[in-house]
Image (cartoon, grey):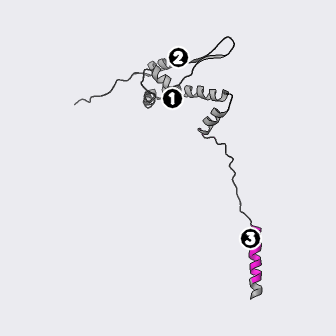
Amino acid sequence: MTETKLGRPPFYSNVEDLQSAIDSYFEKHTGIEYDDNGDLIAVNPPTVSGLALFLGFSDRQSIYDYKGKEAFSCTIKKAITKIEEFAESQLFNAKTPTGAIFWLKNHGWSDKHEVEHSGEINNIAREEREQRIKELLNKAE
């Protein structure tokens, strides 16, 4: 008995075709343009959703599904990392640090001061009270 596969056939059957499409996305679909005065006039930043649509997928999940396939995993990871690198650089180039702070906190950084104490606490006042109580009890006997 033969096994029947259901579902749509994959968009990309080999890594080379997928890599070529990804390269085309970054070269032709993304970018920042400036006018003659150096003012920003158009931004088309790379995004995971934009890459998914460019590759012919219906949603971002398809990108992650391909990432789960051993043959395509490294190619997809590199593309996603390139998108993340662009987003990170924009956060650190912004006029306010809010985006960078948000990103850092979500990647393990903390803005809390943590102080560790070691050694024992010597409470002289308590020791003196206990000694005085012993002296008073001894006198009362």
Q: Is residue 113 above or below residue 26?
A: below
Residue 49 locus on image (x, y percent): 49, 25
Residue displayed at 45% across by 26% down: 72
Q: What are the residue bounds of the magenta stretch?
A: 107-136
Earlier-in-chain disc, 3 versus 2: 2
- Residue beneath label 1, please? 77
Q: Dot 3, crowdedness within 10 Å: few (<14), some or many (≥20)?
A: few
Q: Residue 109 appears in which quarter of the rendering?
A: top right
Identity, as a three-letter code, of the amino acid under mark 3: Arg
Q: Secondary structure at mark 1?
A: helix
For the residues bearing labels 3 and 2, Cβ distance under 8 angstroms: no
Q: Secondary structure at mark 2?
A: helix
Residue displayed at 69% across by 53% down: 116
Identity, as a three-letter code, of the amino acid under mark 1: Lys
Residue 39 locus on image (x, y percent): 67, 16
Of circles 1 and 3, the one toward us is 3
